[in-house]
Structures are given as structure tokens and as C-alpha cells.
Image: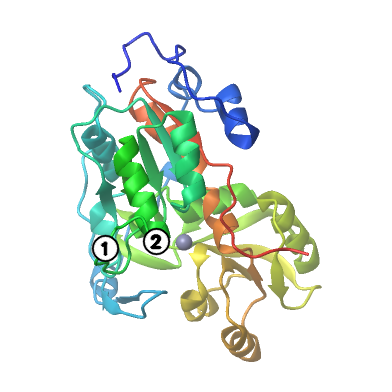
């Protein structure tokens, strides 16, 4: 598809007919370049970062994959030069912009991130952001006429020997290639970056995340997995449960004393029970994450650990899509359109 011209940010070529949430996306164009391209994405408090003080200690830390259980050393992040757009807008240019914000050096050793499908030379006008690459979210991208998907979760995490269209993953890859849609994954590099996934979760919950739960050495900046920050006003755990449910627009599971006073909040978008020990070593009053397991939470509470909230995997990570899409539009000075998938890929039914 032809690339955008300099003045074409509000001119769209004809798109296929849509209905439902995708049609609303096209209609509302919430992140169209002429709006988001000129405004700062993150409040300045996100830039006021403390200095890293203990690089040597943390460089030996091991990271554990929540899916496979594989362990490996964390990387020390290399400084990455800020992205500077000089056109044309290609898949390769989008990748460069994303990796300036979410450096590959922050990727956990077990992870699979980066360009998964597509040619770096292909032109891009429209980028669709999703948590999960599913047949539904790919159909959204097709309906929008997007030439690229940016996903949080890897589509290809474990080795595959076939991408035949007889499986769901095969159909997805076949559809992406057939439709000329590139796929880029920013997973643990987006988790560990700053601002990253847990910053967006904290922002959605209404507080500024100050420090990571598990720091990663990055020279002068403190970044890493999870975030800890303070609410402006303390509230009871019972009230905080309702607040999280409202802020994330989802049902939550919670464990702990409803009367406990909550001020300091630890968050980790996605599966975060591997961090419970690190959270317990902090003075956090509550931990908001997802995919918490029965015995792990029982043990945590039995040891006097803070109250916990399981907000669901999708809900705890989808907050990142909006700021990430806005940042990308700003990087390209309004030459691209970016949209966020309205499709909830949380597989659990709620009653
Ligand atoms: Zn996740």
C-alpha cells in the first residue's frame, strides 16, 4: 500500500466496510496523527528517574520464564539513541522506533520478541496495537487496512515445524502474509522499559510508578520488572479492590484483610506471581498483578505477605496499548495512524 504523503494525515483511502468495535475505531480514530502527533505522551514525572546505584549486585540476577520455567541471566541494557524520523515510513522504520523505546537489550533471555512476519522495506500507514495475536485481532487489522500489527505477546513462542493453515497459528501467519501485514512483538522488552507495561498499569490505577520491583541495570536509569508507587490518598483494601476493578473495567480476585490500609502499591502487568517474594521484601501494602496461583498466594499470606489482587492477564497489560500507540504516532510526527484493539482476549468467562 502506498505510503502517506506529508499532508495526508486526515485523508484515508477507502477501507473495507466494518461493524461493531472496529467500525468505532475507524469512526473515532482516537489516535489519528493530527491529534496525538503534537502532544506529549507521558507526564513529566515519568522522566524524573532516580539514579541506578547497584549495577554490580543486580547483574547476576536470574530471570525465570513464567511459561517454560527456563532461567537465564538478565541482560544489562545498552543505551539506545532516541529515534529520529527521516522517512519513508516502513516496517523497518517502525521497528527502529519501537526498539528505541523498548530496547532489545531489556528482553528476558527466554523471550521471543522482534519482527515476526513481514518485510522491513514494506511501507506502513496504519499500525494496529494488540495484546494477543488471534484470528479476531488479525481480522481487525484487515478490516482497518492496517499494514502492521504491534503485539505484546509473542505469536511464536515455542518452536514450530509447520505454519500450515490447518492450525490457528498457521491460519494467522498465512493470513498475515497473504494480506501483507507485518507483525512485531514487544514483550519483556516493553515490560522492562521505562515507560513500559507496568508504568501504564500504574497510570491507569492513578498513581505514578517510582521504582521497579526487580531492577535491571541500565546505566543511569532505574528500570526493570514491575513498579512500586504511592497512591495520593490511602484507602482500605476493600475500597482499593473496587478502585482497581473500576479503573481496569474488569472483575478482579483479591486476597487479604479488607480493612488493611493501602498506600504503597506494587504492580506487575501480566503473570506476576514469580515476583511475590521480591514484593514481600518491600514495604508495598498491596500487589496488583495477574495469573496468581492458589498455593503461591496461600504461602504468601501465611508468611504475612501483603494483600494481593489478580486483575487478569489481559486487563493488566492492555493499558499499555494506548500510550505505546500514541508514542509511536508522535515518533513519526503524525505520518502514521495507530489504533488499539478493542477485542478482549481474556479467555475466562465472568459470571
Ligand atoms: Zn503477558
Residue matched to label 2? 167
Residue name at image x 50 percent, y 69 percent: 271
Asked where in the image residue 90 lies, by quadrant, the reply is top left
**Label 1 Cα crowd, 10 Å radius (few <14 / some 14-19 / many 20+):** few
For residue 43, say whether it is visible.
no
Q: Is mark 2 on a helix, strand or loop?
A: loop
Residue matched to label 1? 162
Position of the C terminus, as image quadrant, is bottom right
- 173 and 211: which is toward the camera: 173
Residue name at image x 36 percent, y 77 percent: 68
| Residue 130 coordinates in the image, percent (x, y) | 47, 46
- Mark 1 or mark 2, which is nearer the start of the sequence? 1
* Residue reaching furthest to the top: 7
Q: In this view, does 117 lie above or below 226?
A: above
Indicate left or right for 36 with 74 as reference.
right
Q: In this view, does 179 lie above or below 125?
A: below
Position of the N terminus, as image quadrant, is top left
Asked if marks 2 and 1 touch (Cβ < 8 Å), the reply is yes
Residue 143: assigned label: none
Indicate left or right for 120 with 46 as reference.
left
| Residue 227 coordinates in the image, percent (x, y) | 49, 60
- 300 and 147: which is toward the camera: 147
**Label 2 Cα crowd, 10 Å radius (few <14 / some 14-19 / many 20+):** few
Indicate left or right for 223 with 227 as reference.
left
For residue 301, say whether it is visible.
yes
Amino acid at each position: 500500500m502506498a505510503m502517506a504523503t506529508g499532508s495526508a494525515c486526515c485523508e484515508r483511502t477507502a477501507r473495507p466496510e466494518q461493524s461493531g468495535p472496529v467500525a468505532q475505531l475507524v469512526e473515532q480514530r482516537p489516535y489519528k496523527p493530527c491529534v496525538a502527533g503534537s502532544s506529549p505522551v507521558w507526564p513529566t514525572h515519568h522522566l524524573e528517574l532516580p539514579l541506578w546505584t547497584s549495577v554490580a549486585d543486580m547483574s547476576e540476577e536470574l530471570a525465570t520464564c513464567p511459561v517454560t520455567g527456563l532461567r537465564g541471566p538478565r541482560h544489562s541494557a545498552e543505551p539506545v539513541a532516541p529515534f529520529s524520523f527521516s522517512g519513508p515510513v516502513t516496517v523497518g522504520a517502525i521497528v527502529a522506533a519501537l526498539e528505541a523505546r523498548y530496547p532489545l537489550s531489556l528482553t528476558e533471555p527466554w523471550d521471543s520478541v522482534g519482527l515476526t512476519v513481514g518485510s522491513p522495506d514494506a511501507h506502513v500507514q496504519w499500525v494496529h496495537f494488540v495484546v494477543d495475536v488471534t484470528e479476531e485481532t488479525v481480522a481487525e487489522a484487515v478490516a482497518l487496512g492496517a499494514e502492521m500489527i504491534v503485539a505484546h505477546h509473542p505469536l511464536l513462542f515455542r518452536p514450530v515445524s509447520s505454519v500450515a493453515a490447518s492450525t490457528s497459528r498457521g491460519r494467522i501467519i498465512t493470513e498475515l502474509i497473504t494480506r501483507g501485514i507485518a507483525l512485531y512483538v514487544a514483550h519483556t522488552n516493553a515490560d522492562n522499559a521505562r515507560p513500559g507495561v507496568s508504568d501504564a498499569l500504574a497510570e491507569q490505577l492513578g498513581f505514578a510508578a517510582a521504582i521497579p520491583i526487580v531492577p535491571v541495570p541500565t546505566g543511569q536509569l532505574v528500570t526493570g520488572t514491575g513498579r512500586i508507587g504511592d497512591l495520593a490518598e490511602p484507602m482500605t483494601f476493600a475500597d482499593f479492590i473496587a478502585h482497581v476493578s473500576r479503573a481496569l473495567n474488569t472483575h478482579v480476585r483479591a486476597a487479604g484483610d479488607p480493612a488493611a490500609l493501602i498506600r504503597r502499591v506494587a504492580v506487575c502487568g501480566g503473570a506476576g506471581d514469580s515476583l511475590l517474594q521480591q514484593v514481600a521484601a518491600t514495604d508495598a501494602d498491596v500487589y496488583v498483578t495477574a495469573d496468581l496461583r492458589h498455593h503461591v498466594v496461600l504461602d504468601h499470606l501465611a508468611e504475612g505477605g501483603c494483600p494481593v489482587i489478580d486483575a487478569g492477564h489481559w486487563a493488566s497489560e492492555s493499558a499499555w496499548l494506548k500510550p505505546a500507540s500514541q508514542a509511536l504516532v508522535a515518533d513519526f510526527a503524525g505520518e502514521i495512524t495507530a489504533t488499539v484493539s478493542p477485542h478482549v482476549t481474556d479467555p475466562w468467562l465472568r459470571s
